[in-house]
């Protein structure tokens, strides 16, 4: 593909990373610190052999500060995502907290496990820190982004013809997503169906000029999830993702059709 010696100075990567950071409000999605205070980086939740870093669905990536990014890759002791396995009362201050920077004498040994770090024994104070919920972005939103990326990269798409127009389509539950045309002139349409009803309700067709097939799949699925969601938090996250995908610095919302979730 002719990558630069350092692919992270490649213009395609710089543009892609900027879209991810803009979508996330130029803040780390784990600790909430902004670009004025920390160095922000883009983390991939999915890795596919042979793909350049900018050839992923936008939902496969999220903004992290340098410290949280290192923890995500197991280079620094994680400060979240630990699982409490057991608690052992030693009867006295006979144990030692193994958390980095602590080393306090402890009576109650909390045996914890992290999938990227392994086992660790900590005291009562540190266990509360290690197992606390992410405050800046709920785990449900992180799960949502991963769900979108998983669908885009792993879903099966078939070919069809309607009124002499060829399209590819995939299904989500009992609904259908259609993509017409070829790069760089795609459009997408949703076919929604209520449970127990045989006919589809066709949404307006959305033009997506200049977008790759991968991006259009992501736009279509993001729109589908937004239409079906009852959660305002989830809808807000989907809108941010949709706008980051559809509108770049050369384009404003009124310049193309919109089916925002």
Image (tube, rainbow, N blue to C red):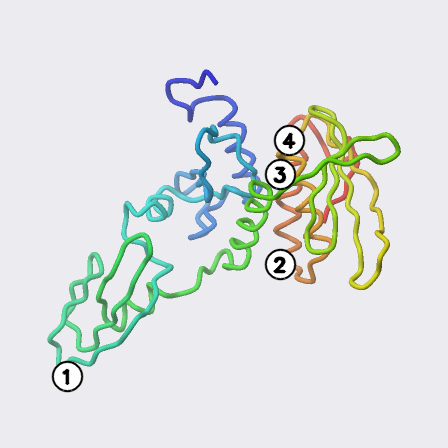
Q: Which numbered dot is residue 91?
A: 1
Q: Is 55 in front, or is 100?
A: 55
Give x and y (percent) for residue 139.
50, 59
Q: Is 169 in front, or is 42?
A: 169
Asked if labels 3 and 4 touch by Cβ distance under 8 angstroms, the answer is no
Q: Residue at x 62, y 56 (%)?
A: 234
Q: Residue at x 28, y 66 (%)?
A: 112
Q: Which residue is mark 4?
A: 248
Give x and y (percent) for residue 167.
76, 34
Q: Which residue is mark 2?
A: 233
- SS type, badge 2: helix
Q: Residue at x 56, y 40 (%)?
A: 153
Q: CA distance from mark 1 to mark 2?
A: 46 Å
Give x and y (percent) for residue 158.
69, 38
- Count of numbered labels shown in the rendering: 4
Asked if labels 2 and 1 touch by Cβ distance under 8 angstroms, the answer is no
Q: Is residue 92 left or right of residue 88?
A: left
Quadrant for residue 188, please give it: top right
Say whether disc 1 or disc 3 marks the residue closer to the N-terminus.
1
**Res. 211 visible in picture:** yes
């Amino acid at each position: 593909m002719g990558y630069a010696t350092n692919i992270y100075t490649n213009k395609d990567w710089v543009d892609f990373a900027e879209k991810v950071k803009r979508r996330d409000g130029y803040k780390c999605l784990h600790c909430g610190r902004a670009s004025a205070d920390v160095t922000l980086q883009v983390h991939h939740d999915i890795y596919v052999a042979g793909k350049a870093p900018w050839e992923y669905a936008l939902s496969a990536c999220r903004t992290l500060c340098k410290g949280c990014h290192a923890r995500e890759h197991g280079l620094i002791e994680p400060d979240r995502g630990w699982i409490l396995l057991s608690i052992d009362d030693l009867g006295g201050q006979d144990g030692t907290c193994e958390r980095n920077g602590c080393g306090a004498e402890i009576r109650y040994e909390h045996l914890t496990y992290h999938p990227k770090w392994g086992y660790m024994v900590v005291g009562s104070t540190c266990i509360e820190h290690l197992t606390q919920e992410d405050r800046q972005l709920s785990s449900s939103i992180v799960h949502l982004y991963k769900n979108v990326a998983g669908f885009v990269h792993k879903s099966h798409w078939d070919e069809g013809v309607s009124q002499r127009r060829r399209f590819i389509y995939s299904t989500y539950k009992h609904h259908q997503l259609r993509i017409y045309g070829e790069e760089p002139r795609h459009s997408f349409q949703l076919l929604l169906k209520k449970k127990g009803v045989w006919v589809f309700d066709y949404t307006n067709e959305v033009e997506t000029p200049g977008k790759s097939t991968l991006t259009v799949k992501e736009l279509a699925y993001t729109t589908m999830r937004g239409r079906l969601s009852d959660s305002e938090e989830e809808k807000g996250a989907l809108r941010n993702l949709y706008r980051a995908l559809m509108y770049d610095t050369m384009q404003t919302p009124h310049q193309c059709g919109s089916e925002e979730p």
